[in-house]
Amino acid sequence: MHVELDGAIINGRWDCSTVAVYDGVIDDDLRSRLLGLLGSAAGWQPDAGPDVLCWEREGFRDVLGDKSEGALSWGLTDDALGRLCSQSPTPGPVLELQSRLQLLIDAANPGVACTVCRMPPAALGDEVPPLAANAPTAAEDRAAFNWHIDADPMLLPPSPWTDYYSRYPNRDPGRPRFVTALLYLPAEWRAEWGAPTRFLDTPTARVLETTPSPGRLILMDQDITHSVTAPNALAGDRPRYSLVLKLVVHPPDGGPLITPRLARSEAVLFGSAARKGEP
Ligand SMILES: O=C(O)CCC(=O)C(=O)O
Ligand SMILES: [Fe+2]
């Protein structure tokens, strides 16, 4: 599935955000090794609940690092997050994920050499890690999962990044595109357990949902308003684990001013994205 939403004219150019859903990019072996990074030991049973040596109850941590009061959901401890984000060395499964994402972007942009990088600390500061994980469960306070954006190159705080690139609309041709890779990690997830990710088409208030499925990968623009939802009671205690990797996709240096694509196929237009050319 490759969907466009949030259609608008930006700087005289028709612009839409993308949500692209990929099955089969993350095979079961890589899925289970990535899930293993969210626990401390081989004996951990992911379906029984988050490993308390790596997870704690906290407010949902969005890109601003807020811990909203009273809304308790599971978040990785600082130590576990540090291990996940480490680049000395980078955990093997994360390296492999990154190289598959580069191949996927290569395939989506034939003949155009785009480069996939982690969101650098120069853009959002050291407080916002480029990797995060979620483990919503049915028992949780649903208010914990707010609508949010991950980041927007137009709304960055002053930083070395804005010194260099200034602020610009995401998807501006020739500029780095802010993209999030979201991965569903449970070994099994049934439709009746719910917990979709929701994406808001702001101009029409219509909501697009992606259904969790083992190893399913979502590539999405970071400026889309979206939210996690909690599983429903049929899921029991089972957490719906997801891994989130914040990326920037650079178009080629000095080449034609293009916007890197997130999928090769033609997009289905959702909500306001279908309004192109309307008065
Ligand atoms: O797990 C999900 O459905 C989305 C997670 C998310 O939006 C985030 O961690 O920023
Ligand atoms: Fe998010």
Image (spheres, helix red, strand yellow):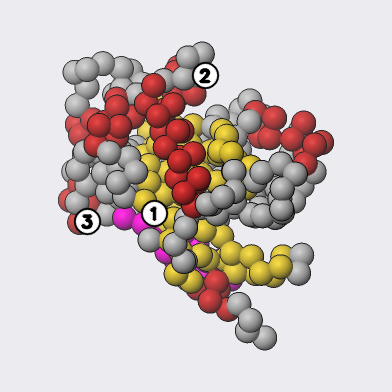
Q: Nearer the viewer, residue 267 or 55?
A: 267
Tell me which segment is drawn in magenta: 199-211
Please name the amino acid that badge 1 sits on.
Val
Quarter residue 103 falls in: top left
Q: Is residue 46 visible?
A: yes
Residue drawn where x is 51% and y is 13% of the image: 88
Q: Nearer the viewer, residue 207 or 168?
A: 168
Task: Answer yes or no: disc 1 within 8 Å of ligand 1.
Answer: no
Whichever of labels 3 and 1 marks the residue nearer the N terminus, that label is 1
Depicted 38 relative to depicted 208: above or below: above
Left or right of 240 in this view: 198: right
Q: Is disc 1 placed on a helix, strand or loop?
A: strand
- Please give the residue where the numbered disc 2 appears in the rendered image: 87
Which label sits in the foreground, 2 or 3?
2
Whichever of labels 2 and 3 marks the residue nearer the N terminus, that label is 2
Whether tag 3 and tag 1 are in contact, CB under 8 A, the answer is: no
- Please give the residue where the numbered disc 3 appears in the rendered image: 191
Residue 150 inside the magenta-drawn segment: no
